[in-house]
Image: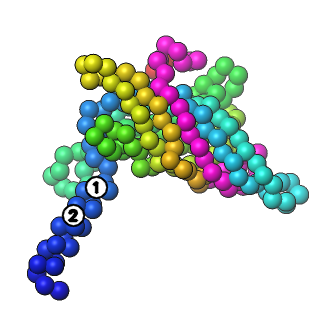
Amino acid sequence: MSDRMRSSCRTVLAAAVLLAAPVAASAQLLDDVWFKVRASVTGLSVDGQGTIVKDKAIRTAYLHFTPTVVAPTDAGGPPIEYYQVDVVTEVAPGSFAVTSSSVAGLIGPSEELSVSLSLVFHLGDGTDDPYFAGSPPVAFDIRLDAAGHFKKATLRSLGGQVIDASLDGVTGFVGDLKLTGASVAPDKLPFPAS
């Protein structure tokens, strides 16, 4: 391979790495933003008789985004900022709790995409109960006010697969995950925002 070809390959590889890696959230637009989301799964379960059956579940939950810092990937580089995403679900009538947390990096000039948003939705009290988990890519439509500050946003999954689930707390489930939602003001939450 010629030196010129090696140099071209290195340039293309470097560009691909830079485009694929999550970049620092530029203005942390979603700092302390809440979303009310509807998560639905459709697929197949194994029932008590060992028969494969169609199954589905829908869960309303609340996602809370707060900036967090993850160590840089290369020594001496600046830390990359990501969001901690807490999933809050109703664990008993009128009682809400954080039932899972994950870290997500958003990419795009205005944080429009999350390559993988790892989420667990509990369908009961948040312990050994029915649940579903997935890691869908998510697109955000973020609206800013005239001063360039966060005003409102919606989100939707771009496809999505359930990566672990048991809709009855006993048997396994496989299927698709769909996520839709919109930002919600903290004073409109059915629980005190903290």
Q: Position of residue 102 (x, y in %)?
A: 46, 42
Sequence-wise, the earlier of marks 2 and 1 is 2
Q: Position of residue 115 (x, y in %)?
A: 41, 50
- Total marks placed: 2
Element at label 1:
helix
Q: Position of residue 72 (x, y in %)?
A: 25, 50
For this view, does 12 lie left or right of residue 191? left
> Is 56 covered by the magenta stretch?
no
**CA distance for labels 2 and 1:** 9 Å
Which quarter of the rendered picture does the N terminus lie within?
bottom left
Q: Which residues are magenta?
A: 164-191
For this view, does 153 lie left or right of residue 126? left
Residue 82 seen in the figure = no
Residue 38 seen in the figure = yes
Dot 1: few (<14), some (14–19), or many (≥20) neighbours within 10 Å?
Answer: few
Residue 19: which numbered mark, if any? 1
> Is 189 covered by the magenta stretch?
yes
Which residue is drawn at the image coordinates 55% and 36% (left, top)? 180
Q: Amino acid at mark 1?
A: Leu
Q: Nearer the viewer, residue 19 or 86?
A: 19
Which residue is drawn at the image coordinates 16% and 79% (left, top)? 5
For this view, does 81 lie left or right of residue 76? right
Q: Amino acid at mark 2?
A: Ala
Q: What residue does disc 2 label?
A: 14
Vertical comparison of 72 with 152: above or below: below
Element at label 2:
helix
Vertical comparison of 129 with 151: above or below: below
Q: Position of residue 65 (x, y in %)?
A: 42, 32
Classify residue 83 by image quadrant. top left
